[in-house]
Image (cartoon, rainbow, N blue to C red):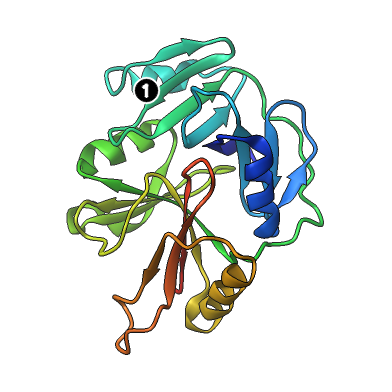
Amino acid sequence: MNAHVITPTPKLSTSLEFYAKLGFTVIPANGPTLVSDGQVLIAIDPDRTARAGIKFFNADHSRTLDALSGRSAVHGTTDGHFLSDPNGIRVVLCDREAPSVDLEGVVPGITGNFAGLSIETSEMDRSVDFWSALGYAITMGDASKGWVSLEADGRPGISLMKSMMCPHLFFNPSLTYFNGKEGNPKVIEAVRKEGIPITEEITHFNKDGLVDNIIIRDPGGLGFFLFND
């Protein structure tokens, strides 16, 4: 993987405890603390200026920076650059190759099947243009209808949702897990068993008013949509 999801933390030990309850594994690597469920790498960053987002690794980001010209203000860092998408999502371009990590044997946590990052946007066209400049391409959906899915090799997928479409809380960005109508109740039960606070219990999509989707957040505020589809 040549990208990490970034999550800030008020206290590293608190975040590690949260991810341990989710069944994530700490991945040995130089640099920030990494955790994974074998599907996504999350860098827990205790720096007070850290924000939720994505870090991309490449020894030379010059072509990407050229493609992004005029789309966002770019700020220099000690090891690369950072900028924001039209929705304020932090994007870090690190001027080195991604650290070598071994995910063999890392099993999925209780969250289930990872389906990428979800981002709510009030500027769909600009958002598609921004992520396309970063090397993503639309694989599903229609921007004119308010939803698209974008993919790029070695990176988490991105789903863009038009503002006012989702009848639940939305934290930008959020990790999304889809577990099906049979699997998600087991995920919800496991979350409750671990004593993980549920930010929102969602009944909107269930004709019987049952909780069949939930949202949780890690200590740094990164959202997790644990949905049935």
In the rendered image, is residue 151 in sight?
Answer: yes
User: What amino acid type is highlighted by mark number 1?
Assistant: Ala
Vertical order, 105 against 221 (above or below)? below
Task: Tell me which residue sits at (80%, 38%) in the image.
Answer: 28
Percent across and percent down for residue 41 are 63, 44
**Who's the residue at 28% across and 33% down the image?**
86
Label 1 crowd bin: few (<14), some (14–19), many (20+), radius 10 Å: some
Is 91 placed above or below 219 here?
A: above
Q: Is residue 117 left or right of residue 165?
A: right
Q: Report which residue position mark 1 lands on.
A: 67
Residue 167, percent across and down? 25, 64
8 left or right of 28 in image: left
Which of 32 and 125 lies nearest the eye of the viewer? 32
Which one is nearer the viewer's eye here, 89 or 201? 201
101 left or right of 188?
Answer: right
Label 1's element? helix
Residue 117, how many percent across, how many down? 45, 50
Which part of the image, by quadrant, shows the N terminus? top right
Residue at 48% x, 15% y is 62
Q: Position of residue 148 (x, y in %)?
A: 32, 54
Query: Which quadrant would the C terminus be assigned to in this image?
Result: bottom left
Quadrant location of residue 201? Answer: bottom left
The reply, left or right, for residue 213 in relation to residue 25 is left
The answer to whether any part of residue 229 appears in the image is no
